[in-house]
Image: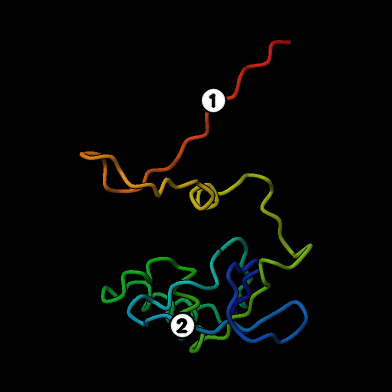
Protein backbone atom coordinates (compact mmCIF):
# COMPACT_ATOMS: atom_id res chain seq x y z
CA UNK A 1 0.00 0.00 0.00
CA UNK A 2 1.04 3.58 -0.58
CA UNK A 3 -1.87 5.56 0.90
CA UNK A 4 -5.13 5.01 2.74
CA UNK A 5 -8.02 7.46 2.69
CA UNK A 6 -9.64 7.29 6.12
CA UNK A 7 -13.00 8.59 4.84
CA UNK A 8 -13.71 8.26 1.12
CA UNK A 9 -17.04 9.59 -0.18
CA UNK A 10 -18.71 8.10 -3.28
CA UNK A 11 -16.46 5.07 -3.00
CA UNK A 12 -15.51 3.15 -6.13
CA UNK A 13 -13.25 0.13 -6.14
CA UNK A 14 -12.93 -3.44 -4.95
CA UNK A 15 -13.65 -4.51 -1.36
CA UNK A 16 -10.62 -6.17 0.21
CA UNK A 17 -12.00 -6.52 3.75
CA UNK A 18 -15.22 -5.62 5.58
CA UNK A 19 -13.97 -2.06 6.20
CA UNK A 20 -11.48 -1.38 3.41
CA UNK A 21 -11.54 -1.15 -0.39
CA UNK A 22 -8.89 -0.68 -3.08
CA UNK A 23 -9.58 2.49 -5.07
CA UNK A 24 -10.01 2.16 -8.81
CA UNK A 25 -10.57 4.77 -11.51
CA UNK A 26 -14.23 4.90 -12.53
CA UNK A 27 -14.02 3.78 -16.17
CA UNK A 28 -17.65 4.87 -16.60
CA UNK A 29 -16.46 8.48 -16.47
CA UNK A 30 -14.43 10.08 -19.29
CA UNK A 31 -10.65 10.16 -18.88
CA UNK A 32 -10.70 13.75 -20.16
CA UNK A 33 -12.70 14.72 -17.06
CA UNK A 34 -10.23 12.91 -14.81
CA UNK A 35 -12.76 10.10 -14.20
CA UNK A 36 -14.43 12.68 -11.93
CA UNK A 37 -17.25 11.47 -9.70
CA UNK A 38 -15.87 9.00 -7.16
CA UNK A 39 -13.64 8.67 -4.10
CA UNK A 40 -14.06 12.25 -2.91
CA UNK A 41 -12.42 13.70 0.16
CA UNK A 42 -9.09 14.22 1.82
CA UNK A 43 -10.59 14.21 5.31
CA UNK A 44 -7.71 12.14 6.64
CA UNK A 45 -4.94 10.25 4.88
CA UNK A 46 -2.28 7.76 5.89
CA UNK A 47 0.87 7.56 3.78
CA UNK A 48 3.55 4.88 3.76
CA UNK A 49 6.71 6.97 4.14
CA UNK A 50 8.87 4.64 2.03
CA UNK A 51 6.37 5.02 -0.87
CA UNK A 52 5.68 8.73 -0.52
CA UNK A 53 8.13 10.00 -3.17
CA UNK A 54 6.74 7.65 -5.84
CA UNK A 55 3.15 8.50 -4.92
CA UNK A 56 3.90 12.25 -4.93
CA UNK A 57 5.58 12.11 -8.33
CA UNK A 58 2.71 10.16 -9.94
CA UNK A 59 0.09 12.42 -8.37
CA UNK A 60 1.93 15.64 -9.30
CA UNK A 61 2.15 14.60 -12.94
CA UNK A 62 -1.63 14.08 -12.99
CA UNK A 63 -2.60 17.21 -11.02
CA UNK A 64 -0.43 19.56 -13.12
CA UNK A 65 -1.41 18.06 -16.50
CA UNK A 66 -3.12 21.01 -18.19
CA UNK A 67 -4.94 18.73 -20.62
CA UNK A 68 -7.16 17.49 -17.75
CA UNK A 69 -8.07 20.52 -15.59
CA UNK A 70 -10.57 18.47 -13.56
CA UNK A 71 -7.53 16.76 -12.03
CA UNK A 72 -6.65 19.89 -10.04
CA UNK A 73 -8.84 18.40 -7.29
CA UNK A 74 -6.28 16.22 -5.55
CA UNK A 75 -8.82 13.63 -4.34
CA UNK A 76 -10.14 13.21 -7.88
CA UNK A 77 -6.60 13.03 -9.29
CA UNK A 78 -5.60 10.37 -6.76
CA UNK A 79 -8.60 8.28 -7.69
CA UNK A 80 -7.81 8.67 -11.40
CA UNK A 81 -4.27 7.28 -10.95
CA UNK A 82 -5.31 4.52 -8.58
CA UNK A 83 -4.56 1.99 -11.32
CA UNK A 84 -0.90 3.13 -11.11
CA UNK A 85 -0.55 3.45 -7.33
CA UNK A 86 -1.75 1.32 -4.42
CA UNK A 87 -4.41 3.39 -2.67
CA UNK A 88 -7.04 2.04 -0.28
CA UNK A 89 -9.98 3.69 1.40
CA UNK A 90 -12.49 3.43 4.22
CA UNK A 91 -15.95 4.09 2.75
CA UNK A 92 -17.61 7.28 3.99
CA UNK A 93 -20.77 5.30 4.69
CA UNK A 94 -19.09 3.11 7.34
CA UNK A 95 -20.74 3.55 10.72
CA UNK A 96 -19.18 4.50 13.03
CA UNK A 97 -16.16 4.73 10.69
CA UNK A 98 -12.68 5.90 11.58
CA UNK A 99 -13.40 9.63 11.30
CA UNK A 100 -16.27 12.00 12.00
CA UNK A 101 -16.92 15.39 10.40
CA UNK A 102 -16.94 17.05 13.82
CA UNK A 103 -20.18 18.96 13.28
CA UNK A 104 -18.44 21.77 11.39
CA UNK A 105 -20.42 21.15 8.24
CA UNK A 106 -19.36 21.49 4.67
CA UNK A 107 -19.93 24.14 2.02
CA UNK A 108 -20.46 21.35 -0.50
CA UNK A 109 -23.21 19.84 1.68
CA UNK A 110 -24.95 23.22 2.00
CA UNK A 111 -24.85 23.76 -1.77
CA UNK A 112 -26.02 20.21 -2.47
CA UNK A 113 -28.92 20.64 -0.04
CA UNK A 114 -30.15 23.95 -1.48
CA UNK A 115 -33.65 23.93 -2.92
CA UNK A 116 -33.73 24.92 -6.56
CA UNK A 117 -36.63 26.70 -8.21
CA UNK A 118 -37.17 24.94 -11.55
CA UNK A 119 -40.34 26.83 -12.47
CA UNK A 120 -40.48 28.65 -15.77
CA UNK A 121 -39.41 32.28 -15.50
CA UNK A 122 -41.91 35.04 -16.19
CA UNK A 123 -41.52 36.94 -19.44
CA UNK A 124 -38.34 39.01 -19.22
CA UNK A 125 -37.27 37.15 -16.10
CA UNK A 126 -34.03 35.35 -15.35
CA UNK A 127 -33.34 32.26 -17.43
CA UNK A 128 -31.33 30.26 -14.89
CA UNK A 129 -32.85 28.51 -11.84
CA UNK A 130 -32.19 30.29 -8.57
CA UNK A 131 -31.88 28.88 -5.08
CA UNK A 132 -35.10 29.22 -3.10
CA UNK A 133 -34.60 30.91 0.23
CA UNK A 134 -36.74 29.68 3.13
CA UNK A 135 -39.12 32.25 4.61
CA UNK A 136 -37.83 34.05 7.69
CA UNK A 137 -38.80 32.38 10.95
CA UNK A 138 -40.69 34.43 13.54
CA UNK A 139 -38.61 35.48 16.54
CA UNK A 140 -39.80 34.05 19.84
CA UNK A 141 -39.63 36.50 22.73
CA UNK A 142 -38.48 35.05 26.07
SS under mark 1: loop
> Residue 28 appears in which quarter of the rendering?
bottom left
Q: Residue 14, position in %: x, y?
A: 64, 87
Q: Which residue has dot 1 on it? A: 136
Q: Residues within 10 Å of mark 2 (few under 14, many from 20)?
A: many
Nearest-to-viewer mark from 2 and 1: 1
Q: Quadrant of the N terminus?
A: bottom right
Q: Which residue has dot 2 on it? A: 81
How is the structure coloured here?
Answer: rainbow
Q: Residue 27, position in %: x, y?
A: 46, 86
Q: Are marks 2 and 1 in contact (CB under 8 Å)?
A: no
Q: Residue 140, position in %: x, y?
A: 68, 15
Q: Quadrant of the C terminus?
A: top right
SS under mark 2: loop
| Left/right of residue 16 with respect to residue 123 in the rendered view | right
Image label count? 2
Image point 50% across, 46% down: which residue? Answer: 114
Q: Is residue 60 shown above or below 24?
A: above
Q: Is residue 9 shown above or below 132?
A: below
In this view of the protein, which residue sits in the foreground, 32 or 74? 32
Image point 60% across, 83% down: which residue? Answer: 13
Q: Is residue 114 shown above or below 40?
A: above
Disc 2 from disc 1: Cα separation: 47 Å
Q: Earlier in the sequence, mark 2 or mark 1?
A: 2
Q: Residue 129, position in %: x, y?
A: 35, 47
Image point 50% across, 80% down: which residue? Answer: 55
| Left/right of residue 71 with respect to residue 111 in the rendered view | left
| Left/right of residue 93 with respect to residue 76 in the rendered view | right
In this view of the protein, which residue sits in the foreground, 62 or 139? 139
Image point 59% across, 24% down: which residue? Answer: 137
> Residue 24 appears in which quarter of the rendering?
bottom right
Amino acid sequence: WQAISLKSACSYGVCVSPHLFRLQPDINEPAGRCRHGTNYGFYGMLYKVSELATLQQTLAQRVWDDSVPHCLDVDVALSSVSDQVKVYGVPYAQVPGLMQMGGHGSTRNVINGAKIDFSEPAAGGASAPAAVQPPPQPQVQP
